[in-house]
Image (tube, rainbow, N blue to C red):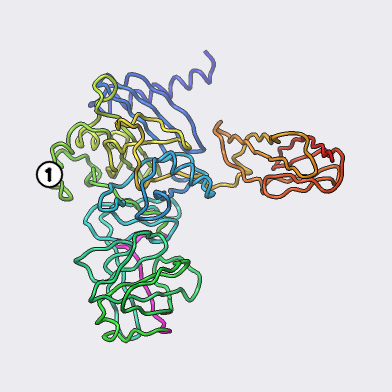
Amino acid sequence: MSYLGSRMKKVFSILFLCFVIVNNIFAVDTLQVKQIYDGVKYYHFTTDEPLSIFLLEIDLSKKIKFELGYANNAIGKAGEPLSQMSSRMVKDGYKVIAGVNSDFFGGDPYVAENSMVKAGNVFKGVNINRNLIGFDCNNQPMISAFNFNGYIQTEENKIKIDQMNANSDTDKVFIFDRNYSINVELKDNQSAFIIKPVNNTTNYGINEYTIVKIFNGDLPKFLFLNRSLIVLPSEYIKMYNLYEGKQIHINLSFEPSINNLYTLIGGLPHIMENGKPIDNFDGREGLHSEKFFGKNPRTAIGFNKKENKAFIIAVDGRRDDYSVGMTMKELSYYMYSLGCEDALNFDGGGSTTMVIRDSVLNKPTDLIGERAVFNGLFICMDDSLNNVVDNIKIVADKNSMAIDDSIKIDVFAVDNWGYKIDVPIDLINFTWSELIVYLKNDYFYPLNRRGYAKVTWYFNNLQGEFGIFVDK
């Protein structure tokens, strides 16, 4: 046996022993391991329970970012299957490695229920006494019942903001931005005003704004762009001396505080306590459901700060011949067996979904297959495409065209781990031998000349060529 083969056998033996000896709940039957990015490993375990467990092990020191994905990019729109959410994020420029469904959802219309921060901006702010996981810009995680802390600061007063991009009958002051697509209507005792930032900035922390327009009746339809809408009791307008043109400060933050908070996403419940697994979940974060605590498909995230690693798992369930799922207690002990110091349960059941890029790995339990969910947590590459693209193929849909025609160019790229990766055509350099065509977006168009051009393309240290013939 070669040294490499011997070493791999030793690695697999260690992994096997880790999951059998440390975790006495399940005996591993088969194991699949694959590197899917630098510092990100994918494991698939099956056991004689039977269980089918999908695991991502993430080295937090590598060039990654934990990104919030939201269904159709707006609160209040329809849900979206996680694989579709991943594909859309790639089109938006994210280099997705893998992802899972995350927070629970409910309401009318359905929305993800807890607070969210996306790329350093507050996406939603509520206080529902549930735990969330936050990541700073260096991927350092924290799990806590983060409290949304919002207020309006004038020279004279401080006005509490109760919710952001959420509404209720019990709270008084609300702020909405372009991420909120649900129609906002003023009640008889409410007024509203539009604010715009004095400087272009994130909305996290304390920032300065100008009151643009005050409304005391019906709200007109308008485009948010970089503006926000504040709804509050009508009496506050006079009480706090609010008027058009007034400069105010808005604070949007969370307690406990995370410096350079980048991503925040919710779950339910916290499944470890002081670094130890939990035996009884009844009453935790308001939960009293034996069905919820019982065998179910599960999604969860945990981390070990000492080793600078995070672990994300998806466990299939509700199928006696394939995978029965885990109880909440089993999930807690399983995360502990991985070496997690802290862990959070995400939405499970039919929502449980894990993807690599946009391909679903597990078997969701809904009869229609993958369920539409409302947010997801994605691990994305935080590196230049120059460093991760292994191969590119440029394909023209044909090699000749008439003077009033065009030729479409498609880019097919593979990363260093064998997965398709999106490379925008504007990152590829093209040259051609004869001035008979020009390139616009991903099409070649003819100039008013007949002839043949050899087109050469370059990307980093990769290059290739193809021919185009223009015939009048």
> Residue 107: percent from the left, percent from the top?
25, 52
> Residue 122: percent from the left, percent from the top?
38, 61
Q: Is residue 276 above or below residue 172?
A: above
Q: Is residue 391 magenta?
A: no
In-front residue for pair 259/285: 285
> Residue 157: percent from the left, percent from the top?
29, 83
Q: Is residue 246 above or below residue 185?
A: below
Q: Which residues are magenta?
A: 245-260
**Residue type at numbered disc 1:** His
Tell me which residue sits at (79%, 45%) in the image: 446
Is residue 262 found left or right of 452 in the rendered image? left
Q: Is residue 251 magenta?
A: yes
Tell me which residue sits at (26%, 53%) in the image: 108
Label 1, residues with CA under 10 Å away: few <14, some 14-19, many ≥20: few
Quadrant of the image containing the C terminus: top right
Kindly identify which residue carries mark 1: 288
> Residue 227: percent from the left, percent from the top?
44, 70
